[in-house]
Image (tube, rainbow, N blue to C red):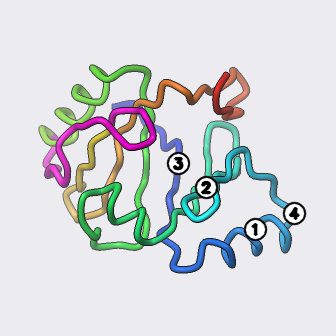
Amino acid sequence: MEQRMTILTLRVEDLDAATRFYVDGLGWKPFLAVPGEVTFLQVAPGVALSLFDASGFDRDAGRPLPHPFNLAHNVDSEADVDRVMGELVAAGGSVVAEPERAEWGGYHAFVADAVGFVWEIAYNPGWSVAGDGTVSIGT
């Protein structure tokens, strides 16, 4: 597994309030906002902050997670999801959710590290990262 994190996802009980805080309050610009579901904000080259509605967060992982956030490692293919999940398990992690097709059109799995923090390993065919780390959807 490459040493990088592409998304920090926060489980939020009030997506509208969280989005207003970051967008209206701080002036941060979302690159994708799906009302009632999720808001993505570029926070650094190659790193996004995801504000995910609590019910969708739990559903996406297949169950409530032990922490109100997860870390994500995006990869270039479905095969990479399987490979990286295997690397995490071989290193002492445990499978939280087996690889599967996601509601949003990609393929992902969830693995807890040795102390319980959860990583989502994801392939999103509509997600691209430019050379400078800027994330875009649908290009």
User: Which residue is under mark 1?
Assistant: 22
**Hey, what amino acid is under mark 2?**
Leu
**Mark 3: secondary structure:** strand
**Hey, what amino acid is under mark 4?**
Gly
User: Which residue is under mark 2?
Assistant: 49
Mark 4 residue crowding within 10 angstroms, few (<14) / some (14–19) / many (20+): few
Upstream in the sequence, badge 4 or badge 1? 1
**Mark 4: secondary structure:** loop
User: Which residue is under mark 4?
Assistant: 27
Q: Mark 2 touching mark 3, by CB under 8 A?
A: yes
Q: Mark 3 touching mark 4, by CB under 8 A?
A: no
**Mark 1: secondary structure:** helix
x, y percent for residue 106: 40, 32
Number of marks in picture: 4
Q: Which residues are magenta?
A: 91-107
x, y percent for residue 50: 57, 56
Q: CA distance from mark 2 to mark 3?
A: 6 Å
